Image: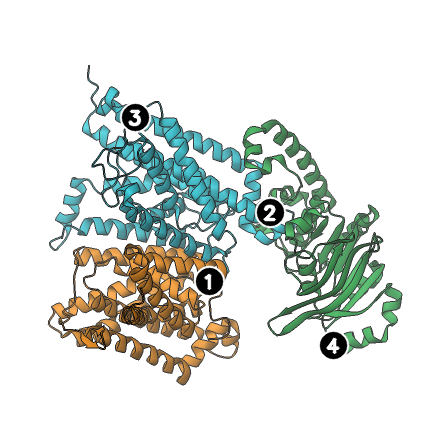
Amino acid sequence: MAFAIPGVASFLLSIGTLALIYALLAIGLNVHYGYTGLLNFGHVAFFAAGAFTSAILTVPPPGPNAGYALGFGLPMPLSLPVSLLAAAVVGGVLATLVGLTSVRLGSHYLAVATFALAGIFEDVLVNEEWLTRGTFGLNSVPKPGRAVLGADLWQVSYFVFALLLTGLVYLVVERLIDAPFGRLLKGIREEEQAAGMLGKNTDWVKLKSFAIGGMIAGLAGGVYAHYIGSVVAVTFVSLVTFLVWVALLMGGAGSNRGAIVGAFLLIAFREGTRLSAVNDFVVSVLPFEASATLVPSLRFVIIGLLLVLVVRYRPAGLLGNPDELVLSEGGER
Amino acid sequence: MSDTENVLEVRDVVKAFGGITAVDAASFDVPDGSITGLIGPNGAGKSTMFNLVTGVLTPDSGRIRLRGEDVVGEPPHRIAEAGVGRTFQTPKVFAGMSVRENLAFAAKDQTGESALGALLRPGTVAKEEAEIGERVQETLEFLELDHVADEYARGLSGGQRKLLELGRVLMLDPELVMLDEPAAGVNPALTDRLLERLHELNDEGRTLLLIEHDIDLIMNNCDHVVVMHNGSKLASGPPSRIQEDERVVEAYLGGGE
Amino acid sequence: MADFVGVVQTLLYGLINGSVIAVGAVGLTLSYGVTRFINFAYGELLTLGAYTALLLVGMGLGLPVAAVVAVLVIGVGGVLVARVFYDPLSDRGALPLLITSIGVAFVLRNLVRAAAGTEARQLPVPLMRPWVVAGLRLNPVDAGVMIAAVVAMLSIHLLLQRTMLGKKMRATSGNEQLARVAGIDTDAVVRRTWLISSVAGAVAGVLLAVQFPPFRPTMGWDFLIVVFSATLLGGIGKPYGAMVGALVVGVAMSVGTRYVATEYTMAYAFAILVLVLLFKPEGIAGGEL
């Protein structure tokens, strides 16, 4: 008996799953920026590291003309936990390495350094073709359980799986933040020097923050790889980092619920405006003939404007606490 | 061998910024159990001295000893762990945290400060949090800040921020308490209370080192005074002797405030 | 390989690239000097400069005239962008400005994309045979680009050193509060700095478009790290440092591409940037430049 869902439901599920992946990314960035005040402009690198880790662990071992040198072909779905755990670990390790180089920098220099390091990382992924197949990407990442469940049931199951995973990460991060660990992060965010004078090793704590946020982004990468079934280096560009920033600031930095809500709003907007009905409507109301790139471009114009407006009129975002994280102080450098 | 009757010994410390020598071969002692006043005209190098002792800055040369142990080159958090707490001339409170959280932050050796401890040892963390909470409450009452305990530090007045910073230092429970102008910006009624508190702390056995501009306050409350001028020590001794020291009078009145 | 001519040739290309980077880096560093935030939308001025020139050429203007008009239009446009997006936040510190500039970059880049499409375009630059002197090749177009870049930098130098505005800019950049106390209308200085900075960005954009055709709407964003790299290497806020930094970055990119690995052209600039931040965040020019 085949399980079938209507097209609308399928569309909503795909938006939902993508939104959950972005929610994970936003929670990771929230650990960095929202709680610790670290301006991480290279988040996409940790996401990419996780995605490629999962991909390389699970794609079939390379045949004669595979075009890539590494593939461990771990059996699915049994090895899904291994694949995702490895993605998180590699994301965390990369974040720790980035943190080791940059954690002493003033906040704005940290932004530029992480931005540049993520750029280098993307360059490496694109150019080291033996590992990533460059611009072609690794396109046979298994979708765990799809063969057994069939396309529609698999989509539902994977969404539920991603939902549970995001819920778990949310609970873990909330617990960390409510504990003295969260107090430690926030103190460093507010006044790093004073935190040091009170006996706290601020560099070490920032490094931990880097690692935890990076692990969550790496995990998001693994979830993404097994959802899409293909991982392509050129898609991990700085745009992804900044979309996560928009989601976090819109939802409210310093609030994990805000991070999740922001991610859903952003993805709903981005994917919703991709519907052909929306496209046709926009084109029909325009007083001139629209080019093919017009609507996609306007989408990002609006996302950019959203970021500008949130910073100017609602710096705490939808769910952030205006007394806690004020986007107006700090960062003298 | 160093003299163990001193908590802090500063020897020939030099610190220059660009071409300007802010601290120039300064040497002085802070006797154990004393309330020591560090005074001097603006630009004498007092705040720089605080930053050198607490590891914010590293001296170009010279020695700084805590209980006989050289601490030059140690990072700030190590010096804090070694028993030094300080406040800043302009208070650096955690504005986006409640007054209670500000205080709890400073407690030492918290299991829940490690991520794994927070996740895996909830029982221990809860027990410690309860203990810390009690100490926070005591500190709030001691400084009469309990009525603002759950407000964000962002909303505090300048005087309240000074008190909160002092409270944080108390939570750290240091042997040597260094206060940079604790009474500046605090209203007179509050100042009297603050001084009372400082004497109580001293009676408990803590050593205090104060930077203060109010000479009367220093003379009436300290039992040892160090006078800095142009980056080095001009004089030191009990207040009665300092008050009569010709050089001090000249530096102060000649230098102008 | 002891290929002397090859080495000199590589250095020459590096200097040409460096001179274009320098124009952009000087523009970025000047605006940083008076506004104190790292402007992630700066690269879009380069894109806008190139595309405006393209538009004007399409309307029938010759390339030199189109380039000059484009540069002036984008200069004024840059001031408007600052007026609309940055001025309202000027009393809230640097971080909101920095994040706003990312939003502005999104807006500007995608407006260009909406209007011009994503296809690669190019300005009508005549194909010319390179001059060959003692085995060294130099394309007349590249020579023109370098001369234009040097003229742009000389103009900025004269402006900073010989004009009242230049003095005020340096004073505001050194200490804004003091400048205000001294009676300088710092708001006006900031506006004019935006103008000069945007003009420099547009010039760099046109030169880049001429030197490395074809270009796309992402050209400025992609080039941003190169400009950051030069700016920080020279010590942010220091125009002469930025010029030196740009030449170093240009040569490093050229040498790295030729002798280390061809596919990593941009990564050399990225690497310089990271190294500077790690080991000498104040830049190579320690003093007042």
Q: Residues within 10 Å of mark 2 (few under 14, many from 20)?
A: some
At label 3, the amino acid type is: Pro
First in sequence: mark 3 vs mark 2: 3
B116 left or right of C242 in image: right
At label 2, the amino acid type is: Asn
- Residue sitting at x 20%, y 21%: A4
Nearer-the-camera pick, B255 or B154: B255
Residue designated by label 4: B255
Disc 2: which chain?
Answer: A
Residue designated by label 3: A144
Q: Residues within 10 Å of mark 4 (few under 14, many from 20)?
A: few
Q: Is residue A199 visible?
A: yes
Where residue A241 sits: x, y (%)? Answer: 36, 47
Nearer-the-camera pick, A8 or A23: A23
Q: Colour of chain A?
A: cyan
Q: Colour of chain C?
A: orange
Disc 1: which chain?
Answer: C
Secondary structure beneath label 4: helix
Q: Are marks 3 and 1 on the same chain?
A: no
- Residue sitting at x 23%, y 40%: A67
Label annotation for residue C52: none
| Image: A209 above or below B122 | below
Where residue A122 sits: x, y (%)? Answer: 33, 49
What letter labels the chain drawn in green?
A: B
Secondary structure beneath label 2: loop
Res. C98 image quadrant: bottom left
Quarter of the image that includes the N terminus of chain C: bottom left
| Image: C280 above or below A230 | below
Label annotation for residue C91: 1
Residue designated by label 2: A201
| Image: C40 above or below B22 | above
Front position among marks 1 and 4? 4
